[in-house]
Image (cartoon, helix red, strand yellow):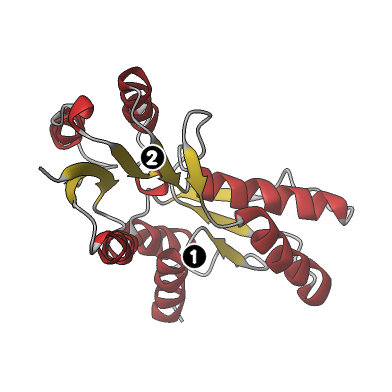
Amino acid sequence: MPKKIALFSCGWAFDLLHDYSKGVVKRMQGHDVDLYMFVCYPPYVEDEIKKVGELNIFNLPYIEDFVGVLILGNAIDHVGVFESIVERCRKANVPVVTTGRKHEYAYFVGSDNYEGAKSIYTHLVEMHDIRNPIFIAGNANNDDSNTRLETLHEVMEEHGLDSSGIQVFYSMWEPKLTVDYIHEKFGSKKVPLPDAFVCANDTLAIAVCLALEEIG
């Protein structure tokens, strides 16, 4: 009987999930292993009942049936959900590999958000004289978004700038909410634009660019 590996992820990060799962399947070829994917689409801005209903798929598998668990941690950023999955694995003594979010029990594979963000922000401050950026964040529970925001504060302070005035808009990873925010805040032209919009990911950056173009 093939061994079983479980993969947990929210499906909103579909491009990440697609590439990640494709790589896992490729690596599994030639091994007697089956991959079981547990994916859901919990809302960030709708009612609590729908969110709970979607997230319940993570409670479906009996963890003891699996020899290993993969978690796309940066795609699961609802409060306590990531931690709950890892804790179930720990109690079952099942090894875990996470991406995007670290946990003391799990092996971790991830990108260096800090150094990459610091390089970009240093360029913005030193070459473009940025003083009052607006940060378009994901949501308040996402480690990637938070690291990038914290690094922006750090770089500005290191350059003798007051970072307390950084405006933050939590988009909940919704491009439409981001577009609406730009239209509502800057569409009348009565509010001056910031020196820069710093975005938590490329999708939000594209939304900002489109919205700014729409308002001229």
Amino acid identity at mark 1: Phe
Picture quarter containing residue 40? top left
Evaluate if marks 1 and 2 touch, with contact meaning CB atoms under 8 Å apart. no
Circle 1 Cα neighbour tier, 10 Å, few/some/many (<14 / 14–19 / ≥20): some
117 vs 4, left or right, is: right
Position in image of residue 145 (x %, y %)? 52, 49
Amino acid identity at mark 2: Asp
Position in image of residue 110 (x %, y %)? 52, 53
Residue 216 against residue 34 in the figure, above or below: below
Position in image of residue 85 (x %, y %)? 32, 29
| Residue at image mark 1 | 186
Q: CA distance from mark 1 to mark 2?
A: 29 Å
| Camera-side residue of 189 and 35 | 35
Upstream in sequence: badge 1 or badge 2:
2
| Camera-side residue of 65 and 122 | 65
- Residue at 42% x, 73% y is 206
Numbered circle sitting on residue 77:
2
Position in image of residue 195 (x %, y %)? 68, 68
Residue 192 at least partly seen: no
In terms of secondary structure, where does tag 2 sit? loop
Camera-nearest label, 1 or 2 = 2
Residue 113 against residue 123 in the figure, above or below: above
Residue 198 at least partly seen: yes
- Residue at 31% x, 57% y is 13
Q: Farthest left residue?
A: 1
Picture quarter containing residue 86? top left
